[in-house]
Image (tube, rainbow, N blue to C red):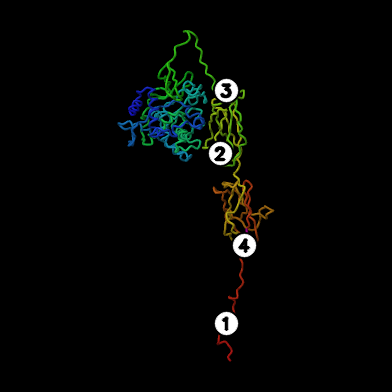
Amino acid sequence: MAAQFGRRLRKGAATTAVAAVAVAALSASQAPGVNDHGRQSAADASPSPEASASDGSATGNSPYYTDLPPLKSPNPSPSTGPAPGGTGATEAGIPATVLDAYKKAEAALREKKPGCNLPWQLLAAIGRVESGQARGGRVDADGTTLKPILGPQLDGNGFALIKDTDDGAYDGNSSYDQAVGPMQFIPSTWAWAGRDGNADGKKDPNNIYDAALAAGHYLCRNNWDLSQQGDLDRAILSYNNSREYLNLVMRWLEYYRKGAHEVPNGTGTLPGNRSDGRANGSPTTTVPGATTPSGSTPKPGPNPGKSETPDKPGGGGSTTPKPPTTPPGTPSTPPTTPPTPTDTVAHLEDAGTGKLTAMAGDAFGRRISTRAETEAGKSVAKVRVRFTIVGDTDTTFTGGEHVATVATNSSGVAVAPELRAGEKTGTVTVRATVVGRTVPGLDYKATVTERAADALARTDDAALTCTPGGTFADQVEVKATYKGAVADGVAATATLIKSADDPAVTDKGPYFKDADGKTVRTLTGLKTDAKGLLKLPKLYADDATGTFLLRVTTAGGAALTVELTVAAAETSSPSPSTSQTPSTSPSDSPSA
């Protein structure tokens, strides 16, 4: 019976209510996150705070396609083209350009964030649920959709309320935001998550290469390891914070893991049911007064006269219109929308961040905390605050991102992810702004200092000696530490000095050679390696004899003085056993 349910849904013959029931029932009974005894695992736990509050979801919790994958495994799958029969093989077909974009995104993330372990099948699962693989692969040769793919406007009428953040640049709507493109990013998320996946110099949410790469980076933030079920759940929930959505994506992920193949662009299987009750068709929607993006065509809702009001975020369902309550001919009064928490924010305040200082390559010990407040100074919860690292710096948030969006908690405070200092030293600016509200931003200054060491020691205690005009047999090697820990990448200088009291460079005694073989007695630009070790080049001696000093110093003030001895080779005096004595023989003796 479950199989019949799935077939009926894919044919579009089932109602929205049946689709919702099927998703819940089949996901509960067969989703990877539930075992045979019905006990819940990590996949069915409550959404974590990171998932529900970190970015407000990539899609703004927009509607999605609820079609289930076939119960029959796609294996064995044909090498090209859809199978003549068997739903499994047909559903496993992914349009060529779309599949290529997913695999290229996986390869890019494997290089940039190898610890994330992003499988391309996860992108395929999300792309299937969000847009039916770009409407069955209706993309041009460069991967751009032939027509824009838009979700409904997020006006709070059954969906999240997200007022316009891009002046209609991506979605053509200057009043409210709409999810855009084959991976259904809302403009405010695309503003920081967008990527150029096809190297054309643009970040276009309507391009499958750009959108797939952006989705990969989005799913790999926060140092999530997608090979771990808990992190995988958090990543999917952050895309659309719905338990049904998580279970559905997991089912498609497992389906594609069992087998998938390439089909020509435009021939992919189209989905039939959506969580907001719309039947099979483009999710493109327009609103009165909105600017339609180039190439899009306005399409009416499935039931003119009915308001689409899901009974859950991104869920299906509709309500029957109520009879009019005012006499005919009475001028209608536009409905008033109550202010959202974001609408009440007047300013941002620092919430006790403190001094932000870190050594290059280290994590900052403090995290930025910002509080959203009304004009009267009252804290405002559930407001999205965007933290952006601005300027020429390689300092990032944990996970390598330069932008992070965090919702304020019940105290009105948003805490940014951990900052990690790059190699560029100096002042870094992190700007906090309110998403969807024009209020002055709040700048935080963070200082990145150079890598430093506070102690130096030789790695051995062998005496360093040489004869005049010779070469020292051993090279000087030192280890740098900072507060007892290895100090890697620390700048160092080695100088042959006149005396312990006079650090000036000496003009006689041991010396180094430069690349041209010339004598040098100061070496700069040295750095300790990953283990905090620094091995100096070979030392040579001139004709001067005596004890000489080599001083090694590092950033942070660590210093070490090493003695070098130049002495003539010892000469040994003849021993009695080797002295020449006249030899006698009986024949040489005087005769008696």
Could you say which disc has been placed on residue 344 in the image? 3
| Front residue of 203 and 326 | 326
Q: Earlier in the sequence, mark 2 or mark 3?
A: 3
Q: What is the quadrant of the C terminus in the image? A: bottom right
Q: Name the element at disc 3.
A: helix
Query: Residue 242 location in percent, x, y?
Result: 45, 28
Q: Give the side of residue 41 with respect to residue 164, left or right.
A: left
Residue found farthest to the bottom: 592
Kindly identify the amino acid type of the residue bearing the numbered disc 1.
Ser
Regarding residue 410, the answer to whether it shows in the image is yes
- Alpha carbon of mark 1 to alpha carbon of mark 4: how far? 42 Å
Q: Which residues are magenta?
A: 564-568
Circles 1 and 2: CB atoms closer than 8 Å: no
Q: Which residue is mark 2?
A: 420
- Alpha carbon of mark 1 to alpha carbon of mark 2: how far? 87 Å
Q: Which residue is mark 1?
A: 583
Q: Earlier in the sequence, mark 1 or mark 4?
A: 4
| Front residue of 45 and 362 | 45
- Alpha carbon of mark 4 to alpha carbon of mark 2: how far? 51 Å
Circles 4 and 3: CB atoms closer than 8 Å: no
Kindly identify the amino acid type of the residue bearing the numbered disc 3.
Thr
Could you say which disc has been placed on residue 468 in the image? 4
Nearer the observer: mark 2 or 3; the answer is 3
Q: Earlier in the sequence, mark 1 or mark 3?
A: 3
Q: Main secondary structure of the magenta part?
A: strand
Q: Earlier in the sequence, mark 4 or mark 3?
A: 3
Circles 1 and 3: CB atoms closer than 8 Å: no
